[in-house]
């Protein structure tokens, strides 16, 4: 019975990790606001009309958040495989 529980936990963790990876790992794109624009110029972004400097800062923060969530997803996948490996050797 213990092996079935460990195997199920591993499978669930791997599925959740895959969702995290595909949602945040593959959707990382960096936005460009133009090389020649000054940092104080206003641009239209998905966050509204803000300066180039603020847009770059928000873009970097979003990329870091996506990167961390994608790494968490990979960790869950690895943990799920570890649970399944332990379940086969019990």
Image (spheres, grey):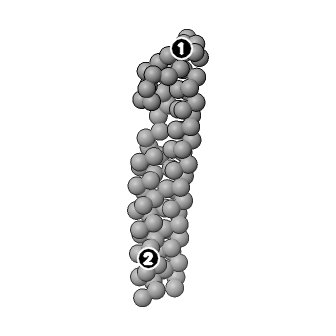
Question: Residue 38, how many percent across, how many down?
Answer: 58, 13
Residue that carries the numbered disc 1 in the rendered image: 41
Please give the name of the residue rendered at 53% of the width and 26% of the height, measured from the top-left corner.
55
Please give the name of the residue rendered at 50% of the width and 31% of the height, measured from the top-left corner.
30
Residue placed furthest toward the bottom:
1
Residue that carries the numbered disc 2 in the rendered image: 7
Question: Residue 53, how many percent across, how many down?
Answer: 58, 22
Please give the name of the residue rendered at 45% of the width and 51% of the height, measured from the top-left corner.
21
The 10 Å Cα crowd at callout 2, few under 14, some 14 to 19, many 20 or more, is: many
Please give the name of the residue rendered at 42% of the width and 61% of the height, measured from the top-left corner.
16
Disc 1 + disc 2, Cβ < 8 Å: no
The residue closer to the viewer here, 54 or 71, is 54
The 10 Å Cα crowd at callout 1, few under 14, some 14 to 19, many 20 or more, is: few
Mark toward the viewer: 1 or 2:
1
Q: What label does residue 62 carry, if any?
A: none
Question: Residue 19, how many percent across, how many down?
Answer: 40, 55
Residue placed furthest toward the front:
49
Whichever of callouts 1 and 2 sits on the residue coming sooner in the sequence is 2
Name the element at disc 2: helix
Q: Count of labels shown?
A: 2
Give the vertical position of 82 relative to 16 (above or below): below
The residue closer to the viewer here, 11 or 53, is 53
Give the vertical position of 7 relative to 32 (above or below): below
Give the vertical position of 37 relative to 4 (above or below): above
Name the element at disc 1: loop
* Distance of label 1 from label 2 (alpha carbons): 55 Å
Side of 53 relative to 46 (left or right): right
Quarter of the N terminus within the rendering? bottom left
The residue closer to the viewer here, 39 or 29, is 39
């Amino acid at each position: 019975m213990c092996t079935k529980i460990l195997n199920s936990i591993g499978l669930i963790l791997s599925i959740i990790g895959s969702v995290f990876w595909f949602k945040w790992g593959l959707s990382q794109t960096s936005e460009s606001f133009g090389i020649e624009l000054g940092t104080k110029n206003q641009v239209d972004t998905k966050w509204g009309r803000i300066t180039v400097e603020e847009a770059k800062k928000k873009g970097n923060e979003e990329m870091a958040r996506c990167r961390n969530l994608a790494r968490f997803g990979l960790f869950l996948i690895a943990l799920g495989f570890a649970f399944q490996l332990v379940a086969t050797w019990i």
